[in-house]
Image: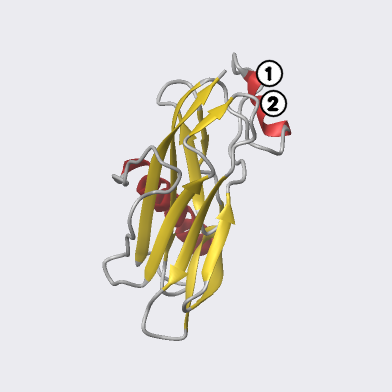
């Protein structure tokens, strides 16, 4: 049990580190540009938004797709839950995402099928945070609405080849910038 908790905590930290610290492909268009595959050419991964500029009153739609392109008919990988993670930040006082459940979960990806993962809010706040009212409203609303500003949207994954591995065998991140106007 302790070993599983350590492994899952390790996977969580590695995934967050991959999302936060790796350099992604910057773009101000609605799709992260170009195909990027991992070093073993096993997955194609994309990050999308319906638009590059939104109004503060518009629902923002963000999603990622992943496709297994390896040699076999499918692949089973282990990751945190959810397997694909998102972070949105203005580089100042707004940052959401990066929260995953530390349970190691297996996922089967079939070759040639593109799997879609829609952005879902994750994160939290402290009741004594000076912006607690803002965060409460933000997390209560199911859809994504952002205040005026420029935001970096990142998405990524970190997969292991086996359930007892402490290593990340496949990882990618993508990012682009969106602008929100009044």
Q: Is residue 21 visible?
A: yes
For image coordinates 33% across by 56% down, the residue present is: 34
Quarter-of-image position of residue 122 = top right
Tell whether 42 sits left or right of 102.
Answer: left
- Closer to the camera, 76 or 45? 45
Q: Residue at x 39, y 75 (%)?
A: 69
Q: Which residue is mark 1?
A: 133
Q: Which residue is at 58% across, 25% downward?
A: 55
Give the class, few, some or many, for how many residues have Cα within 10 Å of label 2's Cα (few <14, many ≥20): some
Point out the residue furthest to the left here. Answer: 39
- Measured in 3D between alpha carbons, the distance from the residue under mark 1 to the one under mark 2, in whole angstroms, is 5 Å
State which quarter of the image contains the C terminus: top right
Seen from the viewer's position, the closer of residues 63 and 160 is 63
Figure check: 143 above or below 137: below
Instruction: Give the number of callouts.
Output: 2
Residue 152: percent from the left, percent from the top? 42, 34
In the rendered image, which quarter contains the N terminus?
bottom right
- In this picture, is 53 found above or below 118? above
Label drawn at residue 136: 2
Q: Compared with residue 166, is residue 64 higher up or lower down, i.e. above or below?
A: above
Does dot 1 land on a helix, a strand or a loop? Answer: helix
| Label 2 secondary element | helix
Residue at image location 37% in from the left, 78% down from the top: 70
- The answer to whether the residues at label 1 and label 2 have Cβ atoms under 8 Å apart is yes
- Give neighbour class at mark 1: few <14, some 14-19, many 20+ (Cα, 10 Å): few
Q: Position of residue 27 (x, y in %)?
A: 35, 41
Q: Nearer the viewer, residue 182 or 91?
A: 182
In this rendering, would 57 be left or right of 94?
right
**Any part of residue 168 in sight:** no
Residue 143 vs residue 85: left or right?
right
Q: Residue 2: x and y, percent?
A: 52, 60
Name the foreground residue: 37 vs 157.
37
């Amino acid at each position: 049990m302790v070993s599983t908790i350590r492994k899952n905590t390790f996977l969580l930290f590695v995934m967050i580190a991959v999302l936060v610290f790796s350099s992604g492909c910057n773009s101000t268009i609605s799709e992260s540009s170009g195909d990027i595959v991992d070093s073993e050419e096993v997955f194609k991964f994309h990050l999308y938004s319906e638009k590059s500029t939104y109004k503060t009153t518009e629902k923002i739609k963000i999603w990622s797709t992943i496709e297994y392109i390896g040699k076999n008919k499918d692949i089973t990988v282990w990751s945190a839950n959810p397997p694909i993670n998102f972070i949105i930040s203005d580089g100042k006082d707004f940052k959401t995402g990066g929260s995953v459940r530390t349970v190691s979960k297996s996922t089967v990806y079939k070759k040639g099928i593109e799997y879609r993962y829609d952005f879902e809010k994750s994160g939290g706040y402290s009741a004594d945070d000076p912006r607690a009212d803002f965060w409460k409203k933000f997390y209560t609303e199911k859809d994504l609405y952002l205040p005026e500003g420029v935001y970096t949207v990142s998405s990524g994954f970190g997969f292991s080849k086996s359930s007892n591995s402490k290593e990340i065998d496949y990882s990618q991140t993508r990012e682009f910038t969106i602008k929100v106007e009044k």
